[in-house]
Image (cartoon, rainbow, N blue to C red):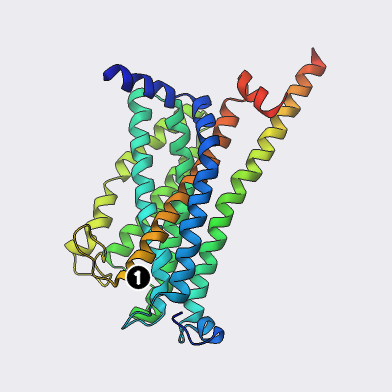
Amino acid sequence: MFETIKRLYHKFGSPRYFYDLTSKMLPWLVAATVLLLIPGLIYGLGFAPPEKYQGNSYRVIYIHVPAASIAMAGYFAMAVAGVIVLVWRMKMAEMVAKSIAPIGASFAFICLVTGSIWGKPTWGTWWVWDARLTSMLILLFLYIGVIALNAAIENAQSAARATAVLSIVGAVNLPIIKYSVEWWNTLHQPASIKMTSSAIDLEMLYTLLSCIGGFYCLFAVMLILSTRCEILLREQRSSWVKKLVGV
Amino acid sequence: MAFESFADFIAMGKHGPYVWSAYGITLVVVLANIVAPLMRRKGLVDDIKRKARREQAES
């Protein structure tokens, strides 16, 4: 058992293995993204019923909720990669952590912007300093901090270790975001989807789940594309990369 | 279909500008995150090839 885990760990820690594996995965992930996201969004925009009180403005939910989920899950993944960087100094984890930051920041940005656009017709304001909104804004700033720190340190390994510390410390913000709607009395509504019960119409629920799945696949595609660039950059002296690009 | 006509669909019952701008901004950010690594990859491959040619010329 332990031997198997160790072997798998070394396999996944190898940039070449990661590159080969993702070459095989990419077409499937792209297909899954297209099959889940495009019908999900079309259905969400044109076919799902309007919401009783909000009318059609609620259709923003089909991007807002997946974006929020990914921004948080992405940060969590970055912090976990950070732990692997600090404890085992795995090069592959350094590259993944570095690649997550701009993508996670993009989704945090999408979440905040779509939320703000949704808030205007629903709450009558673009922004309030509500606990959920503020902690989400802090998440975006944490991502930006990680990107800036990565850019400021020239040596890739030192940059990875410094950003790992920042990511791990910043992870305390994640439970704050998640429970902010329960801990404080806020303008933002509590979660509509739970494992046990959902507060929304089934047609809306399935559409939303399809969009969430599609956006997660899209996130994986973006992350893989970006990490592969990082591999090419850092392994450019190795013979397999030279062979790959045909020199 | 949740709408009577295409014009209805675009209008989204007065919420059109909100819904469409949210989807538009998302589309731009998503595309940027796909195009950027593809362009970066091309630059990296060209760079590796150039370096290899230079090394070959030197030796």
Locate residue B51: give its quadrant: top right
Q: Can residue A182 be seen in this view?
A: yes
x 57%, y 61%: residue: B28
Q: Nearer the viewer, residue A47 or A111?
A: A47
Locate residue A162: give its quadrant: top left
Q: Is residue A83 above or below residue A51?
A: above
Q: Which of A213 and A107 is in front in this view?
A: A213
Number of labels in the image equals 1
Residue A199 coordinates in the image, percent (x, y) = 23, 70
Q: Is residue A148 visible?
A: no
Q: Is residue A160 above or below residue A119?
A: above
- Indicate the secondary structure of the residue bearing disc 1: helix
x 41%, y 78%: residue: A57
Residue A89 coordinates in the image, percent (x, y) = 39, 24
x 24%, y 51%: residue: A175
Q: Mark 1 lies on which chain?
A: A
Q: Is residue A77 above or below residue A190?
A: above
Amino acid type at mark 1 = Met
Residue B52 coordinates in the image, percent (x, y) = 74, 22
- Quadrant occupied by the C terminus of chain A: top right
x 55%, y 44%: residue: A27
Q: How busy is the neighbourhood of tag 1: few (under 14 within 10 Å), some, or many (20 plus)? A: many
Q: Is residue B22 above or below residue A107?
A: below
- Quadrant occupied by the N terminus of chain A: top left
Q: Is residue B49 left or right of residue A91?
A: right
Residue B7 coordinates in the image, percent (x, y) = 56, 86
Locate residue A112: give its quadrant: bottom left
Looking at the image, the residue that sits furthest to the top is: B59
Per the image, the residue denoted by label 1 is A204
